[in-house]
Structure formats: C-alpha cells, structure tokens
C-alpha cells in the first residue's frame, strides 16, 4: 500500500488566504464521516445552552477529527497515519475538544478491553480533561448508557467493549497495565519536553500503540514560553520537516502535522532589521487571525490586543512570552529588558562546522576561559582565537555537568540532553569532567598559540581543583589570570556586543551558547554593566562566563608564545 504524502509545502499561502492547513488526503470517507458525525453531536457541558460541538467547535479541530478516523482503512485493517501533531495557540479549546475526541475514539473502537490514554502535563490539566469528558457524558442519555466514569482514579469505562479511557498527569509509570493501547492524546508537549525522560516515554507510548494495528498518537500543544528543549524541540523539528516535504519519498513514521505558526517573513526579522531595531511584523494584529483557528470562540482580536498592550508595558520579555503562547512565535535567545543586548545579534554571527581544531588552524593567537562551581553547577570552557589577516575573533565553547544536575535541576535537564546530542556538552561525574576539560586545554597548549602571560582566565572562587587540572594540562602560573566576576568582566560584556554588531566576532553554531547568552542578565553597578551568575539566578551561564574571561584577555592584544619564539629564532645570533 502506498504511503500517503502528508506534507503541506504551501502552508504559508494557505494561512494568508484563510484556508485549511489539512493537506489533500485520500481519506476513507465512511470512517471520516462517522467520526465527525459523532463528534458533532457531543455537547459542551460548561457553555450556556450546551451547544453541539458541530455548531460550537472550530473547523480546524473537525478537520483533525476527520483525518484521525479517516486514515483508518477498515478493509485492510491498516492505519495510514500513526501520529498527529497539532500546534495551536492558547484559546483554541484544545483540551475540551481533545476530551470529546477521546470519547469518539471509544465509540469507534471495536477492540475489547483496550486502553486509551489522555496525558496532561499536570494534575490540573488532567482533572480539567476528565471533568469535561464526564460533563459531556452527563449531557447525553446515549453516552450515559455507554460510559461509566470512576472519579477515584479518573477513568471512564466503556460498558460495551470493557475498554477504558485513563486520564492522568505525566509519569514514567503511566503505561503500566496498558496492554492493548489504541489511542493516546498527549497535551502540552512543550511543557513535558523540559523533563529528562520525555523522549523515553514517547518511545514507550509509540511502542505500545504499534502493538495494535489501529493505534494512534495525537499530540496537541502550544509553543514553548522559552527556547524549545528536549522532546518538544526534536518532535517540532521533525513535524516541520514533514510539513515542508523534506522527507517526501523517504520511509518515516506516518505523521500528519497541523502547525499554526505565522509565515517566516512575518514571524522573524533579518539580521539588518534586528540591527536597525525594526518592530517585528507579527506585532501587527492584522496578522493574528492567521494562527488563531478558534478566533471568536470566544477569543477576539480586540481582547487579544488589550492583553498584548498590557504585556507590552511590562517589557520585551513579557511580550515574547505572550507571543509564544498566543501566536506561536518561537523564542530563541532572550530579549528581556535586563538581558544582554548581544543576544539579539548572537545567532546571526555563526561559523558552520567551526570546531576547536579549525579554530586553532585559523588563528594567530588564542586565549581560554574556564568557569565552574559545585557538583550541581555547570563547568564551562571557552576558547577565543584571533583570526589571521582579518583579526576577527572566533570562539568555540564546551560544557559539562555532573549527573546530579539532572536530578536537582530538572527544569534544565531537557536542554542539557539536547546539548549533549549536538556535541557541545557532556554529562560526566565532576572528576571526569575536569579531566575532559584539561584534555581540551592541553590541545590548545600544544598548539603554541597561547600567550606566555595572561592566557587563561579563571574566577578563583571555588576553582582549586580546576587550577590543578589546568596546570596538569601544561598551563603555567604566568599564563593563568585570576579574573573575578563583576567589574573585571564588564569590558568584555561591552566589547563582544560591539564586535557582534560590527561583524568581527564569530562563533561556532552551538545551541549551548545560544541558551547561555539568552540566560544572561545585565546588572548595572556604577557605570559598568555586568553579567554574573548571581544575577542570572537558576539559569545557567557558566560557558558564557568562560567566554567573557577569554574575551578580556584577547582584548589585551596578546601575542602567541609561538610567535615570540619565531621572532627570537629569526634574530641574528652573535658568535663570540
């Protein structure tokens, strides 16, 4: 059987014209019509007059219902689409609609003693979905005869097939006892993506669904209110590629994306526009209905504009968070009022495939910085090289964390696992991490490009072990420069910002550093703007501190020890 093409490469045109994002698919009409007919008859329990979903729901979700059930081939007993991914803004009623979708899945199910799961990020989300489903059942005599809710464990039993809908918050144990898994609805993946084990649970869910030929996974989510991380980041990248046709002709898991995000030229600014402080085009409310498929049910552009104006008074960070939730604008590096202004230019100054070896090969002199704390902190390392001929600065960084960080700082665990996958980070016990840092430092020492003095910047606080490993790597006491955080690093805060704006600072394309730069908060003390870990709070910036330390030393216009040696050897020798 030929796989269906679920791409939608003209999605931007469709949004501008107000057309559905659902690609043209050869759905099985009988199954699709039955699913939508059942969905339409369900009544909203918490709206005046208890309207039918056929009258009250947005067409976007009815299209999704049609595709979910219309992708099942009842003759050959094959599911043509296994995964559905809907990215919609807040106010799209996806939790309520999803509760109804679960009931329809049970009504369409023929398998006895099967299990369907609704998974919410928190108990509050799960409770909301359960209450909505129970309310829908209570509004229909037919559904009351068919289903029996059990409040004590948030389960709804199908009295005909003996199957169950289990509604629960996210937990590693959610699949225990789910033998015949036929349907899973996962709500707000952007929140679950921050957890360390979400990818593993998704693999378990898909494995459980694959044991039944009709098994289907539906993911509904808004955009993340911070830079996408973990499972959410990887899933979003995959479904965008599916939508854009990147995998066309390739064998992949059958997936249908339904992504309500603004066209690229509206959602983003060019490098030149950023530097000119041009106002983002997405701030124009004329564009908002494009990504609000539930507009006027009950959210209106007028109510959104009032809320947007209120958030704008709070500053740029509040506006970005609002836009991520209401317009699905993806947050990259931070844009808070107290953020480092260099963050706006950071992602524009990348050198693809720049690693430590290529940096050393292109540089006439290099400096290093290293920074770390205790076992629950990160260890950061950065190298800056001054490029031959151009004298542009090139930077490359690396980071480490003890495994205990994943337990104590679960809010950043997803990010750290992403960085490890990209190759800019390692999760090692603290001793092995210091030894690994020393191996990179030794490679720089062996290059001969370090200055004879003031070559390696380190904050001496809690750095005794770090000193030992650096000395073991061949760094001399003359090369080590003790730089306290605060005023000592202020010139690098200004300098790197200016060099980014001038186009004379370039860095390896590392998500680790984009994250650290976005976490940076600026504190003004006297006439100096400072970036410190204390101001950053729980957000981690250790590799950035290491970069600033290397930047201070590079700003002193150093000369490599190799160049000194070459100059010495070039001098005429007086023979006595």
Image (tube, rainbow, N blue to C red):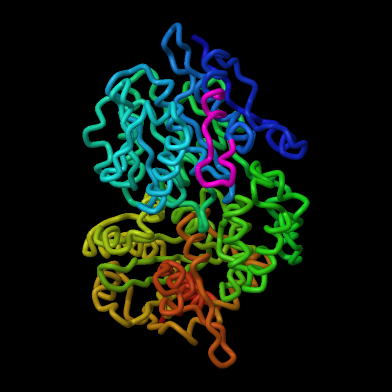
Q: Position of residue 509 (x, y in %)?
A: 53, 53
- Magenta stretch, overall SS: loop
Residue shown at 37% from the left, 27% from the top: 145
Left or right: where does residue 22 sit relative to residue 100? right
Front-most of 27 and 264?
27
How many labels, in total?
Answer: 0
Q: Position of residue 79 (x, y in %)?
A: 45, 18
Q: Is residue 561 visible?
A: no
Please tell me whether residue 42 belongs to the stretch shown in magenta: yes
Front-most of 168 and 450?
168
564 over 221 or under it: above or below = below
What's the magenta region?
A: 36-51
Q: Position of residue 481 (x, y in %)?
A: 39, 81
Q: Position of residue 31 (x, y in %)?
A: 52, 16
Residue shown at 65% from the left, 51% from the top: 299
Q: Determine which quarter of the picture holds residue 460.
A: bottom left
Front-most of 513 and 217?
217
């Amino acid at each position: 059987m030929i796989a269906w093409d679920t791409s939608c490469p003209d999605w931007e045109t469709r949004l501008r014209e107000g057309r559905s994002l659902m690609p043209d698919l050869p759905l099985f009409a009988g199954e699709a019509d039955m699913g939508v007919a059942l969905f339409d008859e369900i009544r909203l329990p918490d709206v005046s007059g208890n309207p039918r979903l056929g009258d009250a729901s947005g067409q976007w979700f009815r299209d999704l219902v049609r595709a979910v059930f219309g992708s099942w081939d009842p003759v050959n007993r094959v599911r043509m689409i296994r995964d559905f991914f809907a990215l919609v803004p807040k106010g799209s009623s996806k939790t309520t609609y999803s509760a109804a979708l679960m009931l329809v899945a049970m009504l369409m199910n023929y398998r006895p003693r099967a299990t369907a799961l609704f998974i919410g990020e928190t108990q509050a989300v799960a409770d909301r979905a359960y209450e909505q489903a129970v309310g829908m059942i209570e509004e229909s005599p037919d559904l009351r005869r068919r289903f029996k809710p059990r409040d004590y464990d948030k389960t709804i039993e199908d009295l005909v097939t003996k199957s169950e809908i289990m509604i629960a918050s996210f937990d590693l144990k959610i699949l225990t006892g789910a033998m015949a898994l036929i349907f899973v609805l996962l709500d707000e993946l952007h929140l679950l993506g921050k957890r360390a084990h979400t990818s593993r649970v998704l693999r378990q869910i898909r494995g459980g669904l694959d044991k039944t030929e009709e098994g289907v996974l539906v993911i509904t989510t808004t955009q993340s209110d911070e830079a996408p991380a973990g499972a959410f980041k990887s899933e979003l990248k995959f479904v965008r590629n599916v939508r854009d046709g990147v995998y066309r002709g390739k064998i992949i898991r059958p997936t249908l994306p339904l992504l309500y995000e603004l066209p690229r030229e509206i959602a983003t600014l060019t490098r030149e526009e950023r530097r000119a402080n041009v106002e983002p085009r997405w701030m124009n409310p004329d564009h908002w209905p494009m990504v609000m498929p539930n507009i006027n049910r009950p959210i209106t552009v007028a109510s959104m504009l009032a809320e947007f104006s209120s958030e704008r008074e709070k500053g740029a960070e509040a506006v970005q968070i609002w836009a991520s939730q209401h317009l699905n604008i993806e947050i990259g590096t931070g844009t808070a009022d107290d953020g480092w202004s260099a963050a706006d230019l950071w992602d524009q100054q990348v050198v693809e495939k720049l690693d430590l070896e290529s940096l050393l090969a292109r540089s006439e002199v290099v400096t290093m910085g290293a920074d770390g704390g205790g076992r629950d902190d990160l260890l950061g390392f950065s190298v800056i090289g001054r490029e031959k001929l151009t004298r542009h600065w090139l930077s490359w960084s690396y980071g480490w964390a003890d495994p205990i960080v994943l337990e104590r700082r679960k809010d950043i665990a997803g990010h750290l696992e992403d960085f490890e996958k990209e190759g800019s980070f390692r999760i090692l016990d603290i001793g092995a991490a210091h030894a690994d840092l020393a191996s990179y430092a030794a490679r720089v020492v062996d290059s001969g490009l370090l200055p004879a003095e003031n070559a390696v910047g380190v904050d001496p606080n809690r750095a005794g072990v770090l000193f030992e490993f650096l000395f073991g790597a061949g760094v001399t006491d003359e090369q080590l420069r003790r730089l306290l955080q605060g005023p000592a690093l202020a010139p690098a805060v200004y300098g790197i910002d200016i060099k980014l704006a001038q186009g004379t600072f370039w860095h390896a394309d590392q998500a680790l550093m984009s994250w650290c730069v976005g976490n940076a908060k600026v504190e003004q003390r006297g006439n100096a703007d400072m970036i410190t870990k204390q101001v950053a709070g729980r957000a981690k910036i250790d590799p950035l501190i290491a970069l600033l330390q290397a930047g201070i030393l590079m700003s002193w216009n150093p000369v490599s020890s190799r160049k000194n040696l070459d100059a010495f050897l070039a001098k005429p020798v007086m023979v006595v």
